[in-house]
Image (cartoon, helix red, strand yellow):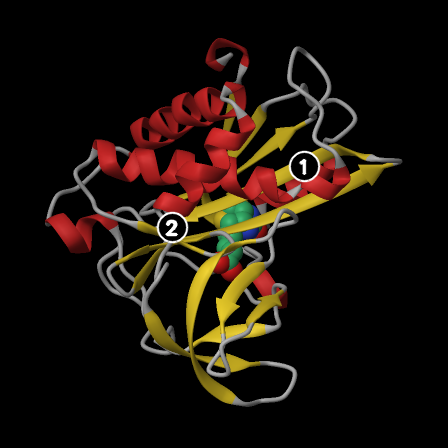
Amino acid sequence: MKQDMTIKWLETVDSTQDEIRRQLKVLANLSVVAALNQTAGRGQRGNRWETRPGENLTFSLLLRPGQDGIRPVPAADQFLLSEIATLALFRTLSDYGIPSRIKWPNDIYSGDRKICGMLIENSLLQENVSYSIIGIGLNVNQVQFNPALMNPVSMSKITGETYDIREVLDRFLGHFSEELDSERPLIRQRYLSHLYRLGELHSYTDCKSGEVFEGTITGISKRGLLRVGMPDGTIKEFGFKEISYII
Ligand code: BTN
């Protein structure tokens, strides 16, 4: 499937997510828009995603499940898209000898530092995902970061090497198409096997109550909620924005 992916490299754009959205009607399935510089990169929770021009990988991929031989993704299973993209990222970093873990739902950490963030915007039609815009910001060659950021790291900071960002993207796309074709129960299994903090006791904040507690991540629900063993012995499920990791 990789052969069918078209990559458009832009010098500067506001946001590759927004560029895909503007071109939605004309872009083929599996189109990729990558930019050397984003002037209004968007992150999760309405945050900005800022990186130094030319140093990192910032791109978005348009996926239309259920078309061109790609299996449909039921709306109820849309977490699968996070699993596929994070696994492809995990494998890309492994190719370069960089150890990483998937921090639920879709960040990639190396040690206790964030090396990659993802913004997945899905559009639903009836029971299925009609299209998904998967936006990825991977820190590649940047070694100096805004001190206001909590815990950033890059491939270069970890290894001391400099990387060709186009090659990193090609590797990611190869892994992404393999993951897209693989058996869904196996995707879930492998996602869990690389999950940050699985089975370990750590501190979290319950965002609804503001309470800090010690808990243990035990897994992921069918719909992609985070399952956490609570101090009282129960298992509680958290959605995105309902739990914050204390790192
Ligand atoms: C996060 O907050 O962790 C998610 C960051 C996602 C950033 C990427 S960079 C490429 C794409 N275009 C955007 O505007 N955002 C995503």
**Residue flagged by tag 1: what amino acid is it?**
Ser
Q: Kindly identify the residue that appears in the image at 72 percent across and 31 percent down.
A: 23
Q: Are marks 2 and 1 in contact (CB under 8 Å)?
A: no
Examine the rendering and report whether any part of residue 35 can be seen: no
User: Which residue is the extreme one toward the left?
Assistant: 160
Question: Residue 65: x percent and y percent?
Answer: 69, 25
Please tell me which residue lies in front, 3 or 80: 80
Q: Kindly identify the residue that appears in the image at 73 percent across and 20 percent down.
A: 66
Q: Is residue 36 left or right of residue 236?
A: left
- Residue 132: assigned label: 1
| Screen quadrant of the C terminus | bottom left
- Mark nearer the N terminus (2 vs 1): 2
Please tell me which residue lies in front, 39 or 33: 33
Question: Residue 104: x percent and y percent?
Answer: 48, 57
Q: Which residue is mark 2?
A: 53
Q: Nearer the viewer, mark 2 or mark 1?
A: 1
